[in-house]
Image (cartoon, rainbow, N blue to C red):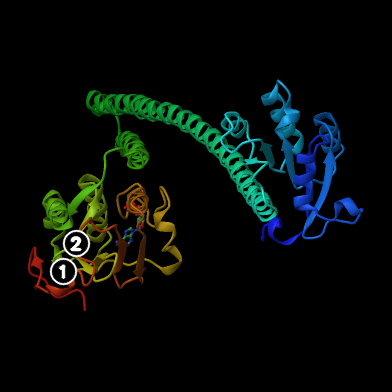
Amino acid sequence: MRPKAVVETIRALWIAGDSPAADRIANLLCPARGAGAACPDHFDLTQARSLDEALELLDSHRAIDVVLFDFELAGPAESAALVRLQTAAGTAPVIVLGDEDDDPQAPAAMRQGAQDWLPKTELTAPALARAIRHAMIRKQIEMDLRRQFVRQRRARSRSQRQTAELRARVERLDAENRELDDFVHVVSHDLKEPLRGIHAYCELFADDYRHHMDAAGVDRLRAIMAICARLEKQIGDLSTYYRVGRVKTTAVRVDLNAVVDGQVASLRTMIDRSGGAVRVKGPLPTVQGHPVLLGMVFGNLISNGLKYNRAHRPVVEIGAMAGQPAIIYVRDNGIGIAPEHHEAVFDLFRRLHGRKEYEGTGAGLTIVRKIITGYGGRIWLESEPGHGSTFFFTLPPAANEPLHPPHWARNRNPGRERSPSAPLCP
Ligand code: ADP
C-alpha cells in the first residue's frame, strides 16, 4: 500500500494562536491562504486557535491526517495537553512546533508521543512538508507495529490457553489410563485365580472319585478343565494385547537376526516335533523397536507357520526385501488362507478353525498387528488355500541405517539354514 503522505492531499490541523509567527507557519503550507484561495500543493489546512477548539474539532470526527501543535498553547500542564491531543488525534501524528531546536522541553514532548519537534523560527516550506510526510510514515509504521503486537499477544494468549487445555486433557487421560491399567491388572489376576481354583478342584475330584465315575463323567470333568485352561489363556492374551500398546520404554536399535535366532531357540521343541525347519534367507535389517515385542511378532508368525501346516516337512522362511522401509516376510508351506479371510485373521479372537483341529485363542495375529502398527508399520498377507501363506510387514529402520540400497540386498549370502530342506521361496 502506498503511504497516503506521498500521494494525496494532506489534511493538516494547525493549532496556534494569532501571531505573526503562527501565520508564517500557516503560510509555509498554504501560501495563498491570505487571499482566501484553497491551499495548493497537497495541503488542506485548518487552524484551531486553542487546544480546546482543536480537541472539539478532532472529537467531531473531522478527518485530519496530521496535527501541528504550537507548544506555546500547551500551557503549564503541557504533558497532559499532549496526551489529550494524542488520544483525540488517533492515527494522525502530532508534530510539536517550539521556539528552539534544542528546547529543553523537546525530549519530554517526544517521550509523550509527539512524532517530531520542529523549531518554528528556522522552518522552510520544503523542510516542513518533508517533516510532515515523514511523521505520517512513522506514525503509520507505529500503528502497524501496534496492530501486529496486539495480534501476536492475542495469538500468544490463545496458544497459552490451548496448551493449558491440552495439558489438562493429557492429565485426565493419564489418570484414566492409570485407572485402566489397575482395572486390567485386577481383572486378569482376579479372574485367573478362581479359574485355577476350579481347575485344581476338578483334578482333586477326578483323583478322589475316579472309582465312582464312569468314562462319561471323567470326560465331562476333563472338558471343564480344558475350558478353564482356555479361559485362563484368553485372559492372558487379552492382558498381553492391552499391555502391548502401553510400552513406555523408548525404542532402540534391534538386530532382527538376533531376534529370530532367539525365537527359533525358544521354539526348538515345536520345530523338532513338527519335523520341519525355519530358514533365514540373507541377513535381516536392523530396525527401531523393542526386542521383546519384535520377538513376539516373529514367535507368533513362526509358530503359526508350523502349526497351520500339514506338509510332510513344514518349512518357515524368513527374509527381507530391499526397500525403504524394508519389507520383512515370513513364509510357510502350510494350509493357506482363503482371500476372504485375509483381513479377518487379524481380528481379536477370530479363528478359522475349531480348537479340535488346531489349538489357539485367535489373539496372536491381533497382537502382532498391534505391535507393527504401533511402530508406524504395516502388515498384510498373500495366501491361497493349499499354497502356503506369506505375511509381509514393515518396520521403521534404525537410525543411521543406509538408505540405498539396504545392505541385505547387496550382500546376497546364501542364508542360514536351521535344517536341510528343499527350497521354499523363488
Ligand atoms: P491362533 O493361532 O491362536 O488361533 P492367530 O491370531 O495367530 O490365533 O490366528 C488367527 C487365525 O488365522 C488362526 O486361527 C488360523 O485360522 C489363521 N492363521 C493364522 N496363521 C496362519 C497360517 N500361517 N496359515 C494358515 N492359517 C493361519
Tell me the kind of residue under disc 1: His
> Which of the 4 image quadrants contains residue 233?
top left
Task: Locate ligand 1 by image quadrant.
Answer: bottom left
Q: Which residue is mark 1?
A: 407
Which residue does the image show at 17% across and 63% down from the upper left?
Answer: 284
Please state which of residues 251 and 235 is positioned toward the viewer in this rendering: 251
> Which of the 4 image quadrants contains residue 258?
bottom left
115 sits left or right of 204 in the view:
right
Tell me the kind of residue under disc 2: Pro
Q: Are marks 1 and 2 in contact (CB under 8 Å)?
A: yes
- Residue at the front extreme, as displayed: 20
What x and y, as percent, mark residue 186? 37, 25
Locate the C terminus by quadrant: bottom left
On screen, residue 423 above or below 394:
below
Please state which of residues 261 and 269 is positioned toward the viewer in this rendering: 261
Label 1 CB less than 8 angstroms from ligand 1 = no
Q: Tell me the crowding category of disc 2: few under 14, some 14 to 19, or many 20 or more residues within 10 angstroms, Cα based.
A: many
On screen, residue 175 above or below 233:
above
Numbered disc 2: secondary structure: loop
Q: CA distance from mark 1 to mark 2?
A: 8 Å
